[in-house]
Amino acid sequence: MNLPTTPRRPFTIIMAEDDEDDRLLAQDAMEACGSKYLCHTVNDGQELLDYLRCQGKYILNDISDLPSVILLDLNMPILDGRETLKQLKEDTLLCSIPVVILSTSSEEEDVSKSYRLGASSYMIKPSKFNLLVDMMKSFNNYWFETATIPHVVIDKDSK
Amino acid sequence: MLLLALVAINTYISQATISKLTALHSEIALATNTVTALEEMHGNVLKAESGQRGYLLNQNEAYLKHYNDAVTNLQASLSHSQTQHSIVPAQARLISSLKTLIQTKVDELSATVRIAQKGDFARAVAIVNAGDGRENYAEIHRLFEEIKSNTNAIAAAQVTKLALITKESARNLSVFFATSLLLLIGLFFLAKLNIKNQRTRELEMEAQNDRLQLAVDERTKELSLFSDELSRSNRELEDFAFVASHDLQEPLRKIMAFGDRLETQAQNLSDKQRDYLYRMRGAASRMSRLISDLLEFSRISTRGKSFQTVALNEVLQDCVDDLNVLIEETDVVIDIAPLPSISADPTQMHQLLFNLLANAIKFSQTRSSPMVSISIKPVAQPASIEVEGLSNWVCIAVSDNGIGFDQEYAQKIFAPFQRLHSRQAFKGSGIGLAICRRIVERHNGEIAAISEIDKGAVFTVTLPINNYLISIKQ
């Protein structure tokens, strides 16, 4: 068995969140839990897809490694989380990136629909900051220390 | 009635005609008989006379035989004729005169014959020749002819009358036939008129029915429009409550989160400043609680599930498990009677019993030996509930020995966000009992509270055992 002692690559997170406050709080919480992973943020679902596909305002981006995990809010303008998730899971390349929902909604319907659409996890935004810190800590712990995730690389020739 | 009268009149007329005809017939027969009798008598008179003459002229006894026969016949005819009578008085008188004359003739003949038999033929012939007998016969002949012609005249008159009556009866028959025909036609028309009237009435009734149906349809349409409008506005209100509470939660969550950040990051805050921060975060968290309670309250009807069989004891045990920490802290004694299974929304039954139990514990925990008991009794359908088809009812009573309340607040406590005590004395947003009432109402039941200050409180929930959800458009 081949146990990796160091990360094979730098893990990165991309977070789609329309609320600036939430983006700030999430960044703060990442920082507070001592996260060593880079967390990039976008404002909505469309921007997320543009980023991942290097299109729109990200057309000049030159990334070869795609983010390791996607943190996705559900209620967003332009393209909301549900539709974004659907499109991600329909994309032959992007569908293998784990998507974790981070929403305020505790609606049973939202939870089950998210999993049905292919979400890997569902987290409810806590109202207390320290709970958010705990949440980010276990998020990092699980996805980057415990679980094994695929390394998705953009095949530039196919673009 | 008219028909009966007409039939009676016709019958009477026919009867009268028949009796008239019968009378006429007997009268005509009588006249004929009279004529026959008179002719016979006439013949006998002639026979007697010729016999007498023969005897007187020939002095031969043989002639007396004819004479005697004739006389005997005459005597019989006379006595018989005595009974005969005519309807015409004048005729009767004539007949009577004729009889007298014939009697005289017979007497005269007898006298002469008796004289001759004594041998005095000459005297007898002399008497005959005297001419009295001839005169007498002439008189008889005249009377006889008169009577005969009279009788014939009467008979003729009777025959005329008979013809008349026959004609009359024929006319009567025609009249009878005509009236019957008229009657039948009249009846036919009456029946037709009746049928026509009936049909008219039926048509009127149908038209009336149609009008009523139209009115009912219109009203139903109006009502359903109104009901649609109402359920739409209800739905909009609930959607609004949902969206509002959801969107209101967002900024609150930020207030609390950044408050946390401030508290952890600010190194040099004074105690007073920390207290302000603490109060601010407390208020935000209470508001968040109020909003989520309101959301829960608004979801009772919208997010309610369909009814299924719910074992209340199991639900209550779950509630006790959920409240375990509080129960251990307060040392409350909970006594639960065996409860039935009822058809209900399981989640809402849990909510209802949890709220009632938590409430009872909350308000009795300050007592030295807090006690909460849950008992049941079968009850009849409460008069205020008009739902049909619910036969078996159960009344669940949750009693505590807590601080109680004044009975005048027994209704007020079921309104949303109503509190009888300060937030400091007892926690809670004041939505619990309002949710209870909303759940019980959705289950076609009734909730009530009985209490007295410092004497504990009893909350009674009356629910149907075999329940069904009243389908109202949401």
Image (cartoon, coloured by chain):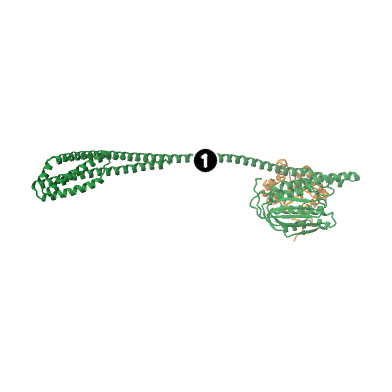
Chain colours: A orange, B green
- Residue at position x 34%, y 42% in the image: B16
Q: What is the x, y in percent for residue B118?
A: 12, 49
Q: Position of residue B378 (x, y in %)?
A: 70, 56
- Please indicate whether residue A115 sits to the left or right of residue B97 in the image: right
Q: Is residue A86 left or right of residue B333?
A: left
Instruction: Count the labels in the image.
Output: 1
**Residue A72 seen in the figure:** no
What element does badge 1 sit on?
helix
Q: Which quadrant: the N terminus of chain B?
A: top left
The quadrant in which the C terminus of chain B is found is top right
- As drawn, which residue projects farthest toward the bottom? A1
Residue toward you, A37 or A122 = A122
In the image, B153 versus A46, the foreground residue is B153
Q: Is residue B211 visible?
A: yes
The percent position of residue A19, horizontal first and vertical second, equals 76, 43
Q: Which residue is mark 1?
A: B205
Residue B367 to residue B161: above or below = below
Q: Please identify the quarter of the rendering in which residue B43 is found.
A: top left
Specify few, some or many for label 1: CA neighbours under 10 Å numbering under 14, 14-19, or 20 or more. Answer: few
**Residue B266 percent location from the top left of the image:** 88, 45
Residue in front for this viewpoint, B50 or B4: B50
Q: Residue furthest left?
A: B58
Q: Amino acid at mark 1?
A: Met
Q: The residue marked by circle 1 belongs to what chain?
A: B
Q: Quick check: B137 left or right of B182? A: left
